[in-house]
Amino acid sequence: MRAHWGETAMGFVVLALAGLFLVYSLGVAHAGRSGQGYELTARVGDSGGLAPGAKVTIGGVKIGSVTAVTLDPKSYLAVIHLSVDSTVPLPTDSTAKITTDGLLGGAHVALTPGGAQGNLKAGDEIANTQGAVDLIGLIGQFIRPHDDAPAAGAASAPAAAANAAAAKPAPYPAGVD
């Protein structure tokens, strides 16, 4: 009978520890957020796999998060919805850039404040944007250069070599060895 009480007590201890871990992890996840923020949008050609919940940073410091990524059906641009901490004013000429945390890291939005006098307000759109860079595509271009068109002058190279050889004088007159 005592063995059953011991197992029951151990079960309660495990459940209590799991609950404490859950509370701690939720607290850490919300640690960088103040309760208030303002919404901004940005349009980019390539969102690079950016997902809701991705961080928004300035100088590597988290100041917000991505709330949604949608597609504009008219322009076919990715529309990124951002929630930015209300204690961080952003000038109207700020820049939003999609970057990654390394080759295998996730995508996030890096903001660079501009120098304009006015600040962005809730609902404004960041006009200066740069989409994600496709690193695999860039590496592929260097490994496999495009062979679609011959290089300039490549077709006339044999003819040019023949003309150069004909124009070069022989070192000795003909018939002299």
Image (spheres, helix red, strand yellow):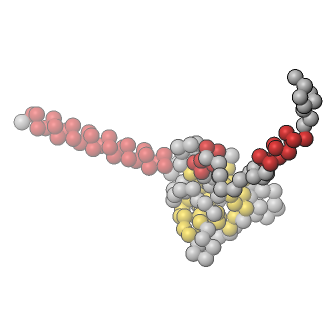
| Residue 164: image location, x then y, percent | 86, 41
- In the picture, the quarter occupied by the N terminus is top left
Q: Is residue 46 visible?
A: yes
| Residue 106: image location, x then y, percent | 53, 48
Where is 70 relative to 8, above or below? Answer: below
Residue 84, quarter of picture: bottom right
- Image point (54%, 54%), residue name: 54
Q: Nearer the viewer, residue 150 or 162?
A: 162
| Residue 149: image location, x then y, percent | 69, 56
- Image point (58%, 59%), residue name: 47
Q: Nearer the viewer, residue 59 or 154?
A: 154
Where is 24 relative to 82, above or below? Answer: above
Residue 82 in the figure: left or right of residue 112 = left
Q: Nearer the viewer, residue 118 or 67?
A: 67
Q: Is residue 57 visible?
A: no
Residue 142 in the figure: left or right of residue 31 = right
Q: Specify the farthest residue to the front.
A: 175
Residue 102, quarter of picture: top right
Where is 73 relative to 148, above or below? Answer: below
- Image point (90%, 37%), residue name: 168
Q: Specify the farthest residue to the bottom.
A: 74
| Residue 20: image location, x then y, percent | 36, 43
Q: Specify the farthest residue to the left.
A: 1
